[in-house]
Image (tube, rainbow, N blue to C red):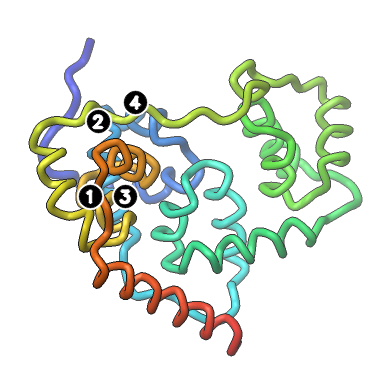
């Protein structure tokens, strides 16, 4: 078995990660890049970090959202698109209502073949911008089937074991930072951070809760003002 790569990421590695991350599950990316899942997540979040975006969604953002939403946790997608999670959730609801119809082209069929086996029909429909009935009819005509994992529903991505150093940093960071910031610092998913913090009985400080509430209100006001 080949040892995992360690150390600094090369420019070609970063370019490949940026291209693949929005549409590729973390566990598969780790195998492709021969890196640990925690390292891949940490590097990806650094690559997509930047100033928050505001205003209407561009066509490129919508395309990225349709794909990434079917692969990663909402909080991770929020980092990729640099928008609040609640804003993305609202946009996803709008995109689900914007369904295309009509003939399928070669690109549609390629995308359907690529994701149909591993995703529930509802997520495939979001990704392709079509109704679930349209997805099912086309998949039937192409004789596409579902993987057993897709039929069972999405499963959480396995994260590395928590070390004593990880737990110490979690206890230090969790009370005064939002969960996404903690996840980025530890190279873990938000779900993993939330679950472990709950088991340890950790809580947010009053100052952190006030700050998160302030940001949520500000984000909502920006959306309402658009």
Q: Secondary structure at mark 1?
A: helix
Picture layout, residue 180 above or below residue 197: below
Q: Which residue is mark 3?
A: 44
- How far apart are the two marked residues, 4 and 2, measured between alpha carbons? 8 Å
Marks 4/1 in contact by CB < 8 Å: the verdict is: no
Q: Which residue is mark 4?
A: 31
Residue 36 has which mark? 2
Query: Badge 4: how crowded within 10 Å, few (<14), some, or many (20+)?
Result: few
Q: Secondary structure at mark 4?
A: helix
Picture layout, residue 214 above or below residue 128: below
Residue 116, image quadrant: top right
Q: Secondary structure at mark 2?
A: loop
- Foreground mark, 4 or 2, reads 2
91 on left or right of 162: right
The residue at 31%/30% (across/down) is 159
State the image coordinates of residue 5 (x, y, percent, origin top left): 17, 29
Q: For the image shown, how many numbered marks are present on the structure? A: 4
Residue 121, image quadrant: top right
Residue 11 has which mark? 1
The residue at 63%/65% (across/down) is 90
- How far apart are the two marked residues, 3 and 4, measured between alpha carbons? 15 Å
State the image coordinates of residue 224 (x, y, percent, origin top left): 60, 84
Q: Secondary structure at mark 3?
A: helix
Q: Is residue 12 visible in this depiction of the protein?
A: no
Marks 4/2 in contact by CB < 8 Å: the verdict is: no
- How far apart are the two marked residues, 4 and 1, measured between alpha carbons? 18 Å
Query: Badge 1: how crowded within 10 Å, few (<14), some, or many (20+)?
Result: few
- How far apart are the two marked residues, 2 and 1, measured between alpha carbons? 18 Å
């Amino acid at each position: 078995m080949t040892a995992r790569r360690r150390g600094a990421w090369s420019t070609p590695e970063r370019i490949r990660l940026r291209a693949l991350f929005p549409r590729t599950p973390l566990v598969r990316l780790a195998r492709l890049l021969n890196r640990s899942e925690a390292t891949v997540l940490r590097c990806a979040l650094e690559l997509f970090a930047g100033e928050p975006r505001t205003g209407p969604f561009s066509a490129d953002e919508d395309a990225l959202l349709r794909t990434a939403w079917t692969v990663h946790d909402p909080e991770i997608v929020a980092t990729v698109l640099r928008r609040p999670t609640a804003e993305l959730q609202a946009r996803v609801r709008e995109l689900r209502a914007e369904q295309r119809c009509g003939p399928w082209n070669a690109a549609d069929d390629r995308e359907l073949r690529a994701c149909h086996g591993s995703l529930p029909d509802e997520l495939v429909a979001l990704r392709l911008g079509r109704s679930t009935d349209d997805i099912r009819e086309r998949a039937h005509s192409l004789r596409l089937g579902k993987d057993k994992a897709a039929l069972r529903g999405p499963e959480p991505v396995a994260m590395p074991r928590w070390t004593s150093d990880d737990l110490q940093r979690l206890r230090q960071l969790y009370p005064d930072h939002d969960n996404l910031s903690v996840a980025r610092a530890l190279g873990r998913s938000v779900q993993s951070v939330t679950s472990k913090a709950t088991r340890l009985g950790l809580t947010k400080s009053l100052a952190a809760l006030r700050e998160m509430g302030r940001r949520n209100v500000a984000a909502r006001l920006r959306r309402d003002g658009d």
